Amino acid sequence: MGGSLSRLWSFFWTKKEIRILILGLDNAGKTTLLYRLKIGEVVTTIPTIGFNVESVTYRNLNFNVWDLGGQTSIRPYWRCYYANTAAVIFVIDSTDIERLGTAADELAAMLNEEELRDAALLVFANKQDQPGAKGAGEISEALKLGELRDRNWSIVACSAIDGKGLDEGMDWLVVSCPSWLSARFLSILDLHGTNL
């Protein structure tokens, strides 16, 4: 019983970082989005070979954010990072209509992974500042998000360059994370036979 109480104490009183993955095809704006969230401004980026990882504080929650490269050769390695992920931010280049089918296939494959079964999904329809960008509704339809069952998800039109839409998406994520934290809390209790 003492061990369970100390775990409960540490659960509530230690600062937790919530693990988030930023995924999407190459050139979707994932790294630009990460650093817009981290430092509030646009930085010059190069294609990510491997990953970038940063701690991001938003609305008093600490996120451990992993931005994984989106090139074809790197995507098979995404699954190496799925464990203990609370949410996935899937970034779409809303101007790249030709690769929307590929993005939909990658998203569907990712969502079928057991390790992401309970992860929330936030889709950022990025590059809304560019001419010809498709809106969130069209992107949602192309990705078949309406067909998702038993998945907490949202799609938000955004621009990582000017920051529009990022707060809306992150606010949704903040509201979605307590359910993950509650599930983790209940699993800690269950593992140690603690009854409420």
Image (cartoon, grey):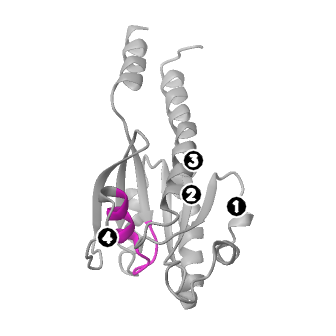
**Which-is-in-front pick, marks 2 and 3?**
2
Q: Residue at horizontal 39%, vertical 17%?
A: 9
**Viewer-side label of 1, 4:** 4
Q: Distance between the Cα atoms at labels 1 and 2? A: 10 Å
Q: Which mark is residue 121?
A: 2
Q: Are marks 1 and 4 in contact (CB under 8 Å)?
A: no
First along the sequence among labels 1 and 2: 2
How packed mark 4 is, by other alpha carbons closer than 10 Å (few <14, some 14-19, many 20 or more), is: some
Mark nearer the viewer, 2 or 4: 4
Q: Using the image as rendered, state which of residue 120 and residue 32 is in the foreground.
A: 32
Please tell me whether mark 2 sits on a helix, a strand or a loop.
Answer: strand
Q: CA distance from mark 4 to mark 3?
A: 31 Å
Identify the residue under disc 1: 148
**Magenta residue check for 24:** yes
Q: Residue furthest top?
A: 2
Q: Earlier in the sequence, mark 1 or mark 4?
A: 4
Marked residue nearer the N-terminal end (4 or 3): 4
The residue at 70%/75% (across/down) is 141
Name the amino acid type tagged 1.
Answer: Leu
Mark 2 vs 4, N-terminal side: 4
* Residue 166 x %, y %: 48, 61
Circle 3 residue: 118
The x and y percentages for residue 22 are 42, 63
* Vertical comparison of 2 with 184: above or below: above
Numbered range of the magenta stretch: 23-37
User: For the residues carrying marks 1 and 2, which lies nearer the camera in this image?
Assistant: 2
Cβ atoms at labels 1 and 2 below 8 Å apart: yes
